[in-house]
Amino acid sequence: MATVSKVLILGGTGEAVALAQALDAAFGPALAVVTSLAGRTKAPTRPLGDIRVGGFGGVPGLTQYLRDGGIDAVIDATHPFAARITANAVAACAATGVPRLRLDRPAWTPAPGDDWRLVPDLHAAAALLPALGGRAFLTVGSSDLGPFKEVPDVRLWARMIEPPAPEDLPKACTVIQGRGPFSLADEEAFLRENRIDILVTKNSGGAAAAAKLTAARGLGLPVVMVDRPPSPPGDSVPTAEDAVEWLRPLVP
Ligand code: NAP
């Protein structure tokens, strides 16, 4: 069996930061760890180990990077909705024979009292809004606002880490810059104060952003839940600790 002395983490999530830390604790200097960030966030949480920033240049660029960088394994810990880099990792690892693991936080599932409207994408979410209410809270990324530009008669509040490009901003939209975790008390207060009647979110999963769902349940608000893109083929684990165990037999 091939051994692993250098691993590439595809990052941009809290799980990727936790993974870099867990790998350092488990393997120390026996394993070199490089985390790759897309470079979208101006002040990202910095993981332990080496960091590289920016796109690779599609599948050919990532394939070349794996070869030139002496990468022995890839752990794709990117966000569940970052489908392009995940597909690129599948293709580049297949081309090079580098083992790949997907670290995928579990999706949220509805609890008793939830009123979820499941939709396949952001366009479907936008189309549903006028029938549900007049004041919607969007918890989406800064590049996700486009589909909401033409929604008639709905006032929008959009929370995101980075501000959107001005041309992406819907007319009746207040942008709130913020990075989780958010407390249940704060989420409830926000929904009440702004008399929100619809919550829109992608099914990102994870604890850091889950309080809004509990708050919406408590207030009896409908949640427009955008479903995840399909998972990649191959090995997948839900936590950083599981990823350490996947690597353990491969690190000398
Ligand atoms: P995406 O659509 O899957 O990827 C678009 C392109 O961005 C990729 O083709 C790749 O460029 C580059 N890229 C993405 N992630 C990268 C990484 N970790 N390292 C180097 N290049 C990367 O990705 P996205 O949805 O825009 O997400 C970008 C980053 O933000 C990811 O790291 C993701 O984990 C994080 N994030 C995304 C979301 C979300 O809702 N999508 C939420 C929170 C965090 P090349 O083809 O040139 O290599």
Image: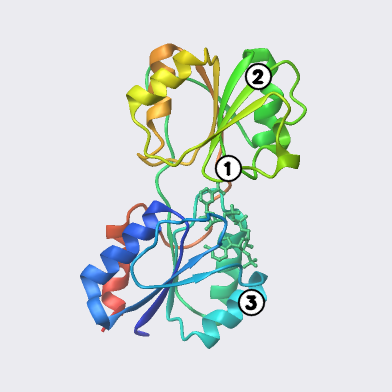
**Spatial CA span between label 1 and label 2:** 18 Å
Residue at coordinates 45% horizontally, 56% vertically from top-left?
44
In-image side of 209 versus 39 (left or right): left
* Callout 1: SS: loop
Q: Note whether ligand 1 is within 8 Å of mark 1.
A: yes
Under mark 3, the amino acid is Gly
The quarter of the picture where residue 192 lies is top left
Mark seen at residue 61: 3
Q: Which percent across, then down, holds residue 181?
A: 37, 39
Q: Is residue 191 left or right of residue 134?
A: left
Disc 3 residue: CB within 8 Å of ligand 1: yes
Q: How far apart are marks 3 and 2 (CA)?
A: 42 Å
Q: Which of marks 1 and 2 is nearer the N terminus?
A: 1
Q: What amino acid does circle 2 point to? A: Arg
Q: Which of marks 1 and 3 is in front?
A: 1
- Neighbor class of circle 3 (other Cα within 10 Å; few <14, some 14-19, many 20+) is some
The first of marks 1 and 3 along the sequence is 3
Residue under pointer 2? 155
Q: Position of residue 227 (x, y in %)?
A: 56, 37
